Image (cartoon, grey):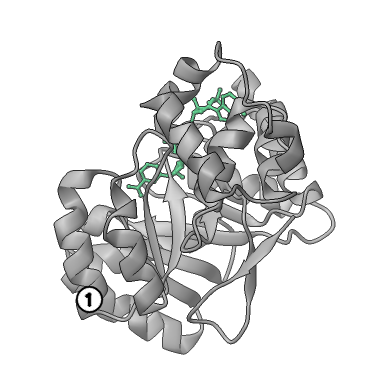
Amino acid sequence: MQTRVIPSSSNESLPIVGLGTYRGFDVAPNDPAYKQLPAVLHALFEKGGTLIDSSPMYGRAEQTTGELLSIHEPRSPAFLATKVWTRGREEGIAQMEESFKLLQTDRIDLMQIHNLLDWQTHLPTLRKWKEEGRIRYIGITHYTPSAYEEVEAVLKAEQLDFLQINYALDDRGVEKRILPLCRERGVAVICNRPFGGGGLLGRLKDKPLPGWAAQVGVKSWPQLALKYLLSHSAVTCVIPGTGNPRYMAENAGAGFGPMLTDAQRHQLIALVD
Ligand SMILES: NC(=O)c1ccc[n+]([C@@H]2O[C@H](COP(=O)([O-])OP(=O)(O)OC[C@H]3O[C@@H](n4cnc5c(N)ncnc54)[C@H](OP(=O)(O)O)[C@@H]3O)[C@@H](O)[C@H]2O)c1
């Protein structure tokens, strides 16, 4: 899988397709869907992906991720990203301590402030923990255009390693100001909701793929929808959410082969608009 450098790092690269755990990993061991999840991780790692994104907001997802990684052989290559999603300094610390336990790790690669909730309070803790080496990178997340003004203000005011934000073929608001700003500020970009929560794929599935899809190594709409995002030079990684091993393998396929030209990207925009 192709990789991209994390701009704030000393040349560390991240594989460009990861995994979102919202919904898909919010399952208990007695749920039949749980049995599929080791194969989802296997598909991610086998194709060279590493980033797994979770949050205390996603029910049991952190715990499930920790359980499955702890039995994964050989030692998992996961790049673990999770979030703090509460108000108050002590509450934030307690929640992040719990994430370490649930994920069964003593180091979290990326800690993000979920939806900017009480970000001024949490940022000093994140900076301190980064200095101490408990977390390696810090970031913020959001999922809706109504938050872009605040996202932009924080990006300008603070030095962050990552922004995680909604970006999909039919949800391109970040292209205007947020993505150029991230490039200017040296902030890595993770695209969440790359299928708009799934709705985008429902609309595309009956349309024929463009004739040039095979030339860019694409066999399906999910792969093409991800490649559209990955073809933006400010994007570091996409994290489609799934609990389905077949979907994970398919999504990871978007991390291979040529990226799209501007003309191909415009054709896709015309098609969805
Ligand atoms: N504010 C935030 O920080 C924030 C907000 C939203 C999301 N996120 C993160 O971003 C991740 C991605 O967003 P999301 O999960 O909400 O939405 P998404 O990735 O846009 O879409 C997920 C949906 O797409 C389906 N899907 C995935 N791969 C597919 C494929 N190859 N073919 C057909 N269907 C496919 C999944 O089905 P199955 O469930 O059947 O696999 C699921 O219903 C989340 O999991 C989470 O980690 C963060």
Q: Which residue is mark 1?
A: 156
Residue 131, can we see it? yes
Instruction: Locate residue 50 relative to residue 59 in the image: left or right.
Output: right
Q: Which image quadrant is residue 272 in?
A: top left
Quarter holding the C terminus is top left
The amino acid pointed to by label 1 is: Lys
Residue 59 image offset from top left, x and y in percent: 41, 38
- Mark 1 is surrounded, within 10 Å at the Cα level, by few (under 14), some (14 to 19) or many (20 or more) other residues, namely some
Q: Is residue 128 above or below residue 253?
A: below
Q: Is residue 179 left or right of residue 7?
A: left
- Does residue 138 appear left or right of residue 157 in this picture? right
Q: Residue at x 63, y 35 (%)?
A: 223
Q: Position of residue 234 (x, y in %)?
A: 46, 63
Say which residue appears at 79% left-offset and 61% top-offset.
75
Q: Is residue 70 left or right of residue 198?
A: right
Which quarter of the image is occupied by the N terminus?
A: bottom right
Q: Vertical placement of 5 versus 142: above or below?
A: below
Residue 161 picture quarter: bottom left
Q: Residue at x 63, y 77 (%)?
A: 12
Q: Is residue 231 above or below residue 138?
A: above
Q: Residue visible at 50% across and 77% down? A: 7
- Is residue 197 placed above or below 79 in the rendered structure? above
Q: Secondary structure at mark 1?
A: helix
Question: Is residue 89 in view from this perspective?
Answer: no
